[in-house]
Amino acid sequence: MLCKKVSVVREQLLDPLATEWGNIPGEPLKMDATPLANQPSEYIKASRDERQIGKVRSLTVQAAHNGSDVFFRLSWEDAEKNTEITDNNVFSDGCGILIPLKDGDTPIDEMGSKDVPVNAWLWRADLKDGPRNTVAKGLGSTQFSEKCAIQAGSAWGEGGWAVVFARALTVPEQQDENVQLAVGRPVKIGFAVWEGSNGERAGVKSFSKEWRELTLEA
């Protein structure tokens, strides 16, 4: 996956409907349901049908950087806009990005490992474009960062969501919690989507089953 070099300021690309996104190629990804066997909750394992998890099966990703900031635009079809938790089986829509914090093999379907933790960027419709930064070292170990260097913008319309994540390429003051990105240093990357109307939250979601390699264009 290529992260295209652009000459655009952060404020422009934070808008998921900005015309500049029309010049950045998108990559369609097949999404799969997260395995029930990997859910840390015994209640979830017993109460959910794996055939009904992961309602969103296709995601388009666009990636760009301007030399100082990196941007990801995630878009997918969703006929129903869910922006809040309204019942015990209706949650907010959401999406996320997953990148290992250091080199090495780590399972994408188990939220990293003790030796190779992962950095996840999370957006949920009920957070009002206030994204969250998290770190995980395996199933059920996700920890939210007190400070978040990520910004997000979102738009729903014509039967779908478009969400933009933006962050500085490096966050040197939080190296244990934020992946550091640079031209010429490929990283693994994965994606997730939560369909709120399908009762999806936490580990119940759609995800890209295999790591992709992200390369920042020089």
Image (cartoon, rainbow, N blue to C red):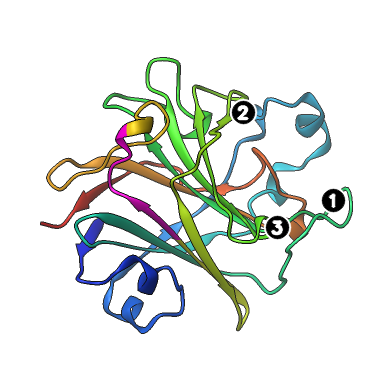
Q: Residue 126 appears at what percent x and percent y?
A: 70, 57
Residue at figure coordinates x 61%, y 28% from the top left:
38
Between 212 and 154, the one nearer to me in the picture: 154
Secondary structure type for disc 1: loop
Residue that carries the numbered disc 3 in the rendered image: 126
Q: Of callouts 2 and 3, which one flags the residue occurring earlier in the amino acid sequence?
A: 2
Considering only vertical position in the picture, is 146 above or below 69?
above
Residue that carries the numbered disc 1 in the rendered image: 89
Amino acid type, mark 2: Asn
Residue that carries the numbered disc 2 in the rendered image: 38
Amino acid type, mark 1: Asn
Q: Quadrant of the C terminus?
A: bottom left
Q: Label 1 near label 2: C-beta < 8 Å?
A: no
Q: Quadrant of the N terminus?
A: bottom left
Separation of residues labelled 3 and 1 (CA atoms): 15 Å
Residue at figure coordinates x 15%, y 48% from the top left:
183
Secondary structure type for disc 2: helix
Residue at figure coordinates x 82%, y 29% from the top left:
43
Separation of residues labelled 2 and 1 (CA atoms): 20 Å
Residue range highlighted in magenta: 165-172
Q: Is residue 53 left or right of residue 114?
A: right
Q: How many marks?
A: 3
| Mark in front: 2 vs 3 | 3
